[in-house]
Amino acid sequence: MHRDVLVGWLNSFLKLSEFKDPSMNGLQIEGKAQVSRVGAAVDAAQATFEKALEEGVDFLLTHHGLWWGQPFPIVGYQKKRLETLFAGGISLYTAHLPLDAHPEVGNNAVIANELGLLDLEPLVVAKYGPIGFIGRLEPAQTLSALGDKLGQLTGMQVLVHQGGPEEVSRVGVISGAAAGEMENAKALGCDLFITGEPSHAHFHQAFELGLNVIYAGHYDTETFGVKALAQRIELEFGIPWVFLDHPTGL
């Protein structure tokens, strides 16, 4: 299908215009006019671009893009990144907060559904709006069992800080780097908050709030959205896709 048709569908489906985001969401690099193979990746980085080139990808979806509110000179490694995309005629499309918040293919909605959370409601972040989700477990589950389940979903060992009760029933989820939202999650009645990467500045807060926190990895909690979005594109338009995995360990 034509690149611009796919871009238009993505912009509408992800509701890009509704988000105030430091990321430049949408089409960041224009590649080939016709899309025949989609790549999905967390990060716009040289390793990801080289894998896209090897896999014959001509339209790459990423959660983290190249631009974050400020221009930069196209020199050094930044020049090499763009040269790789241009050499393969690869379009780069980025969806940051829109792919955290989306109720169907967003990182947080997918994680919540995979964990079996019911009656999902938005978890609103003051700076960005409703990008996470809160749901309930029925019946309640032990913290250790839920940690094991989340580890199985990501394929990585999670970090559990037990500041609250062993049994949990109301769970908040914000992927990536959202340790600073644990007080917000507690105020909304959560007894467990799930996010990506830990923060030294917020270490003591979980225990002092009486809140359980599971850190499941910034990278690992943000693989869900790009995969789900690529699957949706294949379902909608029949375009095959591949996940370009390059874990950061963070």
Image: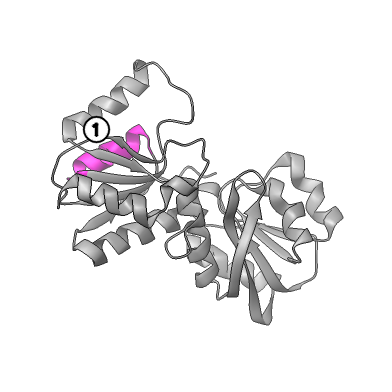
Where is residue 152 shown, x and y percent of the image? 51, 66
In the rendered view, would you say 225 is above or below 104? above
Mark 1: which secondary structure?
A: helix
| Magenta-drawn stretch contains 50 | yes
User: Who is closer to the viewer here, 165 or 188?
Assistant: 188
Where is residue 184 shown, x and y percent of the image? 74, 54
Residue drawn at (63%, 59%) of the image: 123
Residue drawn at (25%, 67%) of the image: 235
Q: Left or right of 114: which side holds 122?
A: right
Identify which amino acid the numbered label 1 is placed on: Leu
> What scheme was used to colour the molecule?
one colour
Where is residue 163 shown, x and y percent of the image? 80, 60
In the rendered view, would you say 145 is above or below 27? below
Quarter assignment of residue 193: bottom right
Q: Left or right of 237: which side holds 60?
A: right
- Residue numbers of the magenta segment: 44-58
Query: Furthest residue to the right?
Result: 208
Crowding at dot 1, Cα within 10 Å, few <14 / some 14-19 / many 20+, comes out as many
Q: Which residue is mark 1?
A: 85
Q: How many marks?
A: 1
The quadrant the C terminus occupies is top right
Where is residue 80 shown, x and y percent of the image? 29, 23
